[in-house]
Image: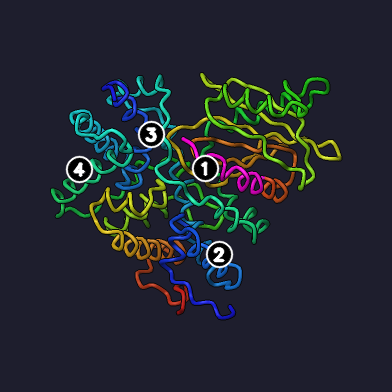
Amino acid sequence: MSGGRRISEAELNAFVDGELVGKEAAEVEAALATVPEDLRFARAIADLNDRLAQHFAHVLDEPIPAGMAALAARAARSGRRWAPAQARALGIAGLLLAGAVAGYAAGALGRGEAGRQPAFVANAFSAHQVFVPEVRHPVEVGAAEEKHLVQWLTRRLGTDVRAPELNAQGWQLVGGRLLPDRDQAAAQFMYEDATGRRLTLYVRKEAGLTDAAFRFAERGDCAAFYWIDRSLAYALAGRLDRTELMQLASAIHAQLGGLSGGQG
Amino acid sequence: MRVTSRRDAVAAEIPRLRRYARALVGDSGEADDLIQDTLERALARLGQWRDGDSPRKWLFSILHNLHVDGLRRRSRRPPHVGLDSLGPEQSAPAADGASGGDLDRALRLLTADQREVVLLVGLEGLSYAETAEVLSIPIGTVMSRLARGRDRLRTLLAYGLETEAEPAGLRRVR
């Protein structure tokens, strides 16, 4: 590191926790790019958080006990959405992942397979398998009408959704569709590459969760990375190898990270 | 805000409260008892919740106070490790060879203070300022407990639960 001051452990912790902004964050980012030890430390902290999230994720899906059921019945009807109490620095996940996509995807993220999947992941796989082979009607609204598509899905999901841009990665938006997911609306965006491979991004509202960790899942020959970011659940599915899918998930996460920052 | 929407807002937080409580106390029955008490106290005090305040922060504060009361009452008892309640998913081996059960046990080996901060920030995503408010401690204390708690957790996970001394290799040499 040339001339830069040393970054303390407290600062690295604060960076991973999304507590730093502006100059402070920039200093840590610079250190992460040049001091391998700092990057290792930051990754270890992020990994620990990821591990906690994975390990306890199943509790969120457990049925609510009878003693709390009266309240829960009301909660199911409640459309109220609470903005996350803080805007986490979501670029961090991408930054920490970018340097070690292959190793990270093969190692730490592999643990996602042992954990229990949220219900939306199964829906995302099903929707992928149903619509991807479709020749004439893979989507309801095509990419030519992207603006209309996004407005429509935003209205139906009741929250800002956007079709991420993956042209740089070689994937073109085909279009999207509205899907049912239990009693909610969900959205599916479809992408295609030059070789005709197809990729789907499934999105639904997931109020009450702010977990941003990437997790990996497989069904048959189809793979998916899924994550939850500011009350929205995402699952990116395709017949791709894990590393390639991880890179795409990372790019999408980075693009959408700033989306809901100014609203809610 | 109407009472109904306040109740709804409280109810919507139940899954997250349960996740936190499970991680905090380890045993699912004990965790749900803590949530039941938290909800009862919250619903009895809906009027004290100020409009505009995050329900999450308010509920986590109530939970924390009840938890601390409980710890004080049982301060003579050793910490309970709820291994009996662990399902197969939780104890399935992870890719790095450590098991989910290790994470549960490692969490139990943190001090109660460290565990709260590590979980509120690392699992529940509260900001340092929110965590400080929930626990009624200064932000500096949040940061130091967090750093110590995470170091200890990483040591326990990396070197096994038998290792009480922290190996020098894990710590950053500065």
Rounded to the nearest whole Å, what is the CA distance between mark 1 and mark 4? 30 Å
Q: In this view, does A134 lie above or below B51?
A: above
Region of the chain picked out in magenta, as a range: A249-264
Q: What's the chain of the residue with tag 1?
A: A
The residue located at (54%, 72%) in the rendering is: A37
Question: What is the x, y in percent for residue B87?
Answer: 42, 40
Three-letter amino acid code at disc 4? Answer: Leu
Labels 3 and 2 share a subunit: no
Q: Which mark is residue B15?
A: 3
Q: Nearer the viewer, residue A105 or B77?
A: A105
The residue located at (51%, 38%) in the rendering is: A116
Q: Residue B66 carries which label?
A: 4
Q: Residue A29 carries which label?
A: 2
Three-letter amino acid code at disc 3? Answer: Pro
Labels 3 and 4 share a subunit: yes
Q: How crowded is mark 3: few (under 14 residues within 10 Å), some or many (20 or more)?
A: many
Q: What's the chain of the residue with tag 3?
A: B
2 or 1: tag closer to the N-terminus? 2
Rounded to the nearest whole Å, what is the CA distance between mark 2 and mark 1? 31 Å
Residue at numbered disc 1: A115
Q: Nearer the viewer, residue A49 or A160?
A: A160
Image quadrant occupied by the N terminus of chain A: bottom right
Rounded to the nearest whole Å, what is the CA distance between mark 3 and mark 2? 34 Å
Q: What's the chain of the residue with tag 4?
A: B
